[in-house]
Image: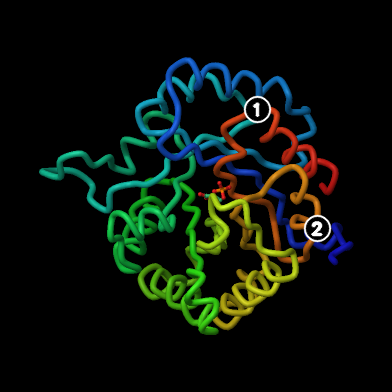
Amino acid sequence: MRTLKSERYIMTRKLLVAGNWKLNGSIAMTNDLISAITNGLSDSNRFDVALFPPFVYLPQASKLVGSKIVLGAQTVSEHAKGAFTGEVSAAMLKEVGCQMVLVGHSERREYFNESNQDIAKKFQVAQAQGLKPILCCGETLEQRESGVTEQVVAQQINAVIDLVGIGAFADAVIAYEPIWAIGTGVTASSEQAQEVHAFIRTLLSLKSDTIAPLVPILYGGSVKGSNAKELFSMQDIDGGLIGGASLTANDFLAICQQADKLS
Ligand code: PEP
């Protein structure tokens, strides 16, 4: 169990609690949820909060978020403009107030056939427009059981490093999300998560010793108020990417409170 919270400060890694709404929301919910979260957050600024509503609510959310919450999108087109029906570019996201974007969420990989190379391009175009990417990675249950978790995660991350270089990770976040823990209620134990987070940091350090300690690595997969403290206390877990529990202000704030206490 990690107890040295000062270490994270020395490395300048602030905890980040990020809420991915996925395909959920409405105009009313956007108003209510963002207002309730804003009111429930302390002014401490010791940890960061980011929300990722669906595209259509981003302009509305942008007016509501204020200084305590950073706004992000759930995906981005790898193209800048042109005949790509249904796509949204990084410049468009920036224009409506986004500062971050998720790339490579496992649902995008699985349901929209996004390859490691597609995701690397999305990472690149996002950064070119000044958006901070959160690169999601993680293995299926079958892959974990066959002992290839590290191999899978390394391929997912190395595909991005190969395109943009390790330097680009100085302004990026990684989210480790074991697919078997997403939306299932089954959370990786803090030790299981820490093991992969430490592996990811070692992987980065093979390319750059100076960048590796700076990169925030979030854990995602059934994070709740009741398990956030244990997870976020681990040495290489720098916060969480939250799905289900980000849709209710009280649930999300309960996770934020744990981050605040550990900061
Ligand atoms: C996610 O989809 O990124 C996620 C972590 O979902 P949940 O918290 O619901 O498991």
Task: Please state which of the two labelled residues, at mark 1 or mark 2, is closer to the viewer.
Answer: 1
Say if mark 1 contacts mark 2, CB within 8 Å: no
x, y percentage for residue 198? 68, 74
Q: Which mark is residue 189?
A: none
- Quick check: 93 above or below 228? above
Dot 2 alpha-carbon crowd within 10 angstroms: few under 14, some 14 to 19, many 20 or more: many
Q: Position of residue 57 (x, y in %)?
A: 40, 25
Residue 126: % across, % down: 38, 50
Q: Is residue 132 left or right of residue 197?
A: left
Which residue is found at the position 54% from the left and 36% from the top? 51
Up-down relation of residue 165 to residue 100 (above or below): below
**Quadrant of the image occupied by residue 90:** top left
Q: Quadrant of the N terminus?
A: bottom right
Left or right: residue 246 versus residue 1 is left
Label 1 crowd bin: few (<14), some (14–19), many (20+), radius 10 Å: some
Coloration of the structure image: rainbow
Label 2 C-beta lies within 8 Å of the nearest ligand 1 atom: no
The picture places residue 209, in percent across and down from the top left corner, at 64, 77
Q: Residue at x 15, y 45 (%)?
A: 84
Amino acid at circle 2? Ser
Q: Name, please, the residue furthest toward the left.
A: 83
Mark with earlier residue (1, 2) = 2
- For marks 1 and 2, give the CA distance: 23 Å
Q: Is mark 1 within 8 Å of ligand 1?
A: no
**In the image, 46: left or right of 166?**
right
* Secondary element at image label 1: helix
Q: Which residue is mark 2?
A: 233
Q: Is residue 37 left or right of residue 172?
A: right
Residue 249 numbered tag? 1
Amino acid bearing label 1? Ala
Q: Residue at x 71, y 33 (%)?
A: 253
Image: 93 above or below 167: above
